[in-house]
């Protein structure tokens, strides 16, 4: 006894050290004295890196083929740079215009519009912009097509006057001699198209841009277009009328007095033109556009351009929920133009119907499969999977044959006397048709998870319930059914998400009243080419699905979903 | 066999047969009768038909032939949920989506019992198995032993008179198994319920039961209280299956009075008690329990029969010594001696003489 006391009270150094170690409260240390956490992390890092490298190809594949398209789609639904890209000068000028003031834009805007449309029509971009704006304002498409043809005439007013003044201005060579640098001119004159060498890129003569800034600007655009897009010999090419109107602007503009200082090639012709220009007939751009189409001197087209000039727009999304942009902000479209809200509601309603009928039909099948001996169950499972081996189109078309007014089902019902011959059921080209056909097509996606979950519920649970006094029904409902809920959940999520985005079957059997939102999306992607709207509809659909998924998680719990084992 | 058609029989199997496939009989001519309050264990190797018997009693399998009676009434046509038999399954079969209390409340709910009565009974039942604090847990949050206790409580909560248990302790470790064995027998006697218990573990069968039915191949080989089963096995299967046993094969030379002489195949003539040998010339297996064999000359009982033996192996097991010998041509003759201060520890290679009393040596079927 005294021995023990001694040992604990004596100042035993080894014991004290041991105790100190026990009482050490800082981070755990590894054998080499580094904190345990850090040396563990170091040990794990290598493993993590090699694991990451191992899955890298898959990761990249998933990113490229799955994440990137979705991101692109989401981006397209708000992206709107076509207006700004096609009409850069006009949209800049329009910033100062008050779209609600009731006044038309001023001359400067019309002039920019002329310049923009001229460049655009040379590049054949104006019709694309027309189609884009046509989504927002009916008639915009033809307006732009017409204007593309009309802008040629506007610049020719100046072109004719300069050419009448001096034939010097008629020829591309002369323009190049004035505007091109000497070095460029030297190499350009040696260049032969047939040689196959690249055309020497146009270089501006030093100082020219100071005295003829606008001419230089548009000549550069012209030169770039000729050399790089048309691949013609720039030296021989006569300039666009647009260049002449810019030339006129320069000669009558603030840099006009510097022209006298110019002494390069064509100095005399330039001086002559500078002297004559102020007395030229000038162009009233607004009037010119009014002559092309009256719509240009009315407010709606300008308001539309102004509204859609920012790079990003919520216009597609507004459109997708049956709203539109007005000068007073977003507003509902007129009653007869509202279609998407109805379509969304119908899509959700029908997807719910399809999911419910899949549960009703799939549950007993899953039950039977799970309770049969393995051999028979496997055989029947092949029958369940058989539809997967048949083309979707074939299956859907088969339903067309079955469900017609003169089809197999109606014939049978009439023969049985269930329905009268003159009141055959309309089973196709409506919602009923879509629901029947899609239930059939999606049924395996319900049966498979149900089966694999039911397979894991041991039969002893039912026996236990019965031994405790439960009738067959009570045992099923209180004990078996709750355990099969994860299968129902997984099947429902699969079927619902598949059906909400289904396209081909509603297209074939849905008629007018049985189509889904996805049919509309497909229409916008392949027929109307309104990809932005299609993207917005798709993004809304995605949000709805994610929302429902979230709600499911909150209500049922996502860990309550089992696809098997 | 040991069927005594008692007048106060509570559970009765009469000439019961069962076949699943129409070709093989899994249960062959089962006759069994249990009085109320008995703890009967069905013991046998895997596949011998124990579970099948239990399932027929519970109503989940129908007998192909024969009659099963409960309290004098034939139950062949009563569906399982009306039989009122409590059952404990090997995998416990606790409903995973219900809490422990809900699991226990379930049989009371389906009996349309009021809420307050239910709660009271659930509480009593849980306290009885020391699980009173676990009512709010899910089965998955309990250990194996705790789950087994809950399963037991659930089988008892609706106060059945008959409780069936199919290898309820099979998945537990040895120590827990022993604790629960004790608790189950204790509870059964306290509540006065009749229990049919299935196991393949002979120790479990011997320690828990009032009577043990040894199954083999769809037949009851012997139905007897544990001590009789061990000390007086009626055939060589039971002798082999229950406890450790030494077998010597040979031919009966003569039977006279209460003993017979057996000529061993490995040489030697021994005296034995004839159990199921009836005439001279029959082949027989002679069975001797290892602890009934003596080698110490001083302690050799009066009139013991002796044989020469060679020590092959000596194993120290703590409370006992286990020695393997070569006797009459077999290398597998075991003797067990208690670890006492004066006990001799044999060495391999030693030549000794062993002996036993003729009444400890039973001549059984070959
Ligand atoms: N549902 C069944 N269908 C067909 N054969 C079965 C079935 N259940 C058990 N058997 C067979 O019956 C025999 C006895 O099984 P069982 O009663 O479970 O034995 P034990 O419980 O003694 O291990 C075994 O050979 C087994 O293969
Ligand atoms: Mg069994």
Image (spheres, grey):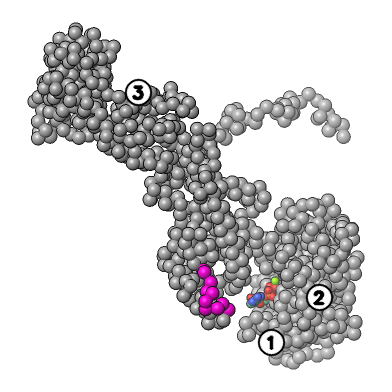
- Name the disc covering residue B83, or none: 2
Quadrant in which residue A229 is drawn: top left
Q: Chain of mark 3?
A: A
- Residue at the spot 14% in from the left edge and 17% down from the top edge: A182
- Residue at the spot 47% in from the left edge and 53% down from the top edge: A518
Q: Tell me the element at label 1.
A: strand
Foreground: disc 2 or disc 3: 3
- Tell me residue B66's x, y (percent): 75, 87
Could you tell whether A116 is left or right of B21 in the image?
left
Quadrant in which residue A170 is drawn: top left
- Residue at the spot 20% in from the left edge and 10% down from the top edge: A259
**Magenta part, dominant SS:** loop
- Tell me residue B348's x, y (percent): 67, 63
- Tell me residue B19's x, y (percent): 67, 83
Q: Earlier in the sequence, mark 1 or mark 2?
A: 2
Range shown magenta: A418-427
With respect to residue B290, does A250 lie above or below? Answer: above
Q: Residue furthest top?
A: A261
Q: Quadrant of the N terminus of chain A?
A: top right
Q: Which residue is mark 1?
A: B283
Could you tell whether A25 is left or right of A176 in the image?
right
Q: Which residue is mark 3?
A: A107
């Amino acid at each position: 006894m005294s021995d023990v006391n001694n040992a604990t009270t004596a100042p035993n150094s080894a014991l004290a050290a041991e105790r100190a170690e026990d009482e050490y409260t800082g981070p755990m240390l590894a054998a080499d004295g580094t904190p345990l956490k850090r040396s563990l992390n170091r040990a794990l890092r290598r493993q993590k890196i090699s694991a990451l490298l191992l899955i890298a190809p898959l990761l990249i594949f998933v990113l490229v083929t799955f994440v990137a398209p979705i991101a692109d789609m989401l981006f397209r639904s708000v992206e709107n740079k076509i207006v700004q890209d096609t009409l850069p000068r006009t949209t800049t000028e329009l910033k100062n215009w008050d779209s609600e003031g009731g006044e038309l834009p001023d001359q400067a805007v019309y002039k920019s519009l002329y310049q923009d449309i001229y460049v655009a029509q040379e590049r054949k971009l104006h019709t694309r912009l027309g189609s884009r704006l046509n989504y927002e304002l009916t008639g915009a498409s033809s307006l732009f097509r017409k204007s593309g043809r009309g802008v040629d005439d506007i610049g020719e007013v100046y072109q004719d006057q300069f050419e009448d003044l001096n034939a010097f201005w008629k020829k591309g060579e002369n323009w190049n001699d004035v505007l091109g640098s000497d070095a460029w001119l030297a190499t350009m004159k040696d260049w032969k198209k047939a040689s196959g060498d690249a055309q020497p890129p146009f270089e501006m003569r030093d100082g020219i841009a100071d005295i003829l800034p606008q001419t230089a600007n548009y000549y550069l655009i012209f030169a770039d277009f000729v050399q790089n897009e048309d691949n013609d010999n720039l030296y021989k090419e006569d300039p666009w009328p647009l260049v002449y109107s810019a030339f006129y602007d320069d000669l009558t503009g603030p840099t006009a007095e510097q022209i006298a200082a110019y002494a390069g090639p064509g100095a005399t012709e330039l001086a002559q033109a500078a002297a004559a220009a102020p007395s030229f007939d000038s162009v009233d751009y607004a009037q010119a556009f009014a002559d092309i189409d009256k719509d240009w001197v009315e407010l709606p087209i300008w308001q539309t351009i102004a509204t859609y000039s920012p790079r990003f727009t919520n216009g597609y999304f507004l459109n997708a929920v049956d709203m539109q942009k007005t000068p007073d902000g977003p507003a509902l479209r007129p009653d007869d133009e509202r279609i998407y809200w109805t379509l969304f509601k119908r899509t959700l309603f029908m997807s719910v119907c399809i999911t419910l009928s899949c549960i009703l039909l799939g549950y007993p099948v899953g039950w039977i499969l799970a309770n049969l001996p393995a051999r028979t169950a496997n055989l029947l499972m092949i029958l369940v999977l058989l539809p997967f081996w048949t083309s979707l189109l074939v299956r859907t078309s088969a339903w067309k044959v079955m469900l017609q007014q003169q089809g197999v089902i109606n014939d049978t019902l009439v023969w049985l006397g269930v329905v009268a011959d003159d009141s055959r059921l309309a089973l196709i080209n409506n919602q009923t048709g879509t629901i029947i056909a899609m239930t059939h097509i999606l049924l395996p996606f319900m049966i498979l998870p149900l089966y694999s979950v039911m397979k894991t519920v041991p039969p002893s649970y039912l026996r236990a319930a019965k031994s405790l006094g439960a009738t067959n029904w009570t045992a099923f409902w209180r004990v078996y059914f709750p355990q099969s809920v994860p299968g129902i959940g997984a099947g429902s999520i699969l079927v619902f998400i598949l059906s909400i985005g289904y396209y081909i079957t509603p297209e074939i059997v849905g008629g007018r009243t049985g189509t889904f939102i996805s049919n509309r999306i497909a229409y916008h992607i392949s027929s109307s080419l309104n990809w932005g709207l299609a993207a917005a509809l798709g993004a809304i659909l995605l949000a709805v699905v994610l929302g429902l998924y979230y709600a499911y998680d909150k209500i049922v719990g996502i860990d309550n979903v089992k696809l098997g084992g | 066999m040991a069927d005594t058609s008692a007048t106060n029989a509570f559970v009765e199997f009469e000439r019961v047969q069962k076949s699943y496939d129409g070709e093989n009989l899994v249960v062959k001519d089962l006759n069994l009768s249990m009085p109320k309050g008995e703890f009967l264990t069905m013991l046998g190797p895997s596949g011998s038909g124990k579970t099948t018997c239990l399932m027929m009693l519970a109503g989940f399998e129908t007998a192909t032939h024969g009659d099963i009676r409960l309290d004098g009434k034939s139950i062949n046509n009563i569906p399982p949920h009306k039989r009122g038999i409590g059952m404990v399954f090997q995998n416990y079969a606790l409903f995973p989506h219900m809490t422990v209390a809900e699991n226990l409340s379930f049989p009371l709910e389906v009996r349309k019992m009021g809420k307050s009565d239910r709660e009271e009974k659930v509480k009593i039942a849980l306290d009885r198995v020391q699980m009173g604090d676990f009512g709010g847990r899910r089965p998955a949050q309990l250990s194996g032993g705790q789950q087994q206790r809950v399963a037991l409580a659930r089988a008892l909560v609706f106060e059945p008179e008959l409780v069936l248990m199919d290898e309820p302790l099979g998945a537990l470790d040895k120590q827990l198994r022993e604790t629960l064995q004790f608790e189950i027998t204790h509870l059964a006697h306290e509540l006065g319920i009749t229990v049919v218990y299935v196991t393949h573990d002979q120790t479990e069968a011997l320690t828990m039961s009032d009577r043990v039915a040894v199954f083999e191949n769809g037949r009851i080989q012997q139905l007897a209280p544990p001590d009789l089963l061990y000390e007086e096995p009626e055939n060589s299967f039971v002798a082999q299956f229950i406890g450790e046993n030494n077998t010597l094969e040979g031919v009966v030379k003569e039977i006279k009075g209460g003993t017979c002489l057996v000529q061993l195949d490995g040489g030697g003539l021994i005296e034995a008690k004839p159990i199921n040998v009836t005439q001279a010339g029959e082949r027989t297996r002679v069975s001797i329990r290892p602890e009934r064999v003596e080698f110490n000359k001083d302690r050799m009982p009066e009139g013991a029969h002796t044989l020469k033996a060679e020590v092959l192996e000596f194993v120290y097991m703590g409370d006992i010594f286990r020695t393997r010998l070569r006797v009459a041509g077999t290398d597998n003759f075991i003797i067990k001696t208690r670890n006492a201060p004066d006990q001799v520890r044999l060495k391999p290679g030693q030549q000794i003489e062993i002996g036993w009393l003729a009444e400890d040596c039973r001549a059984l079927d070959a």
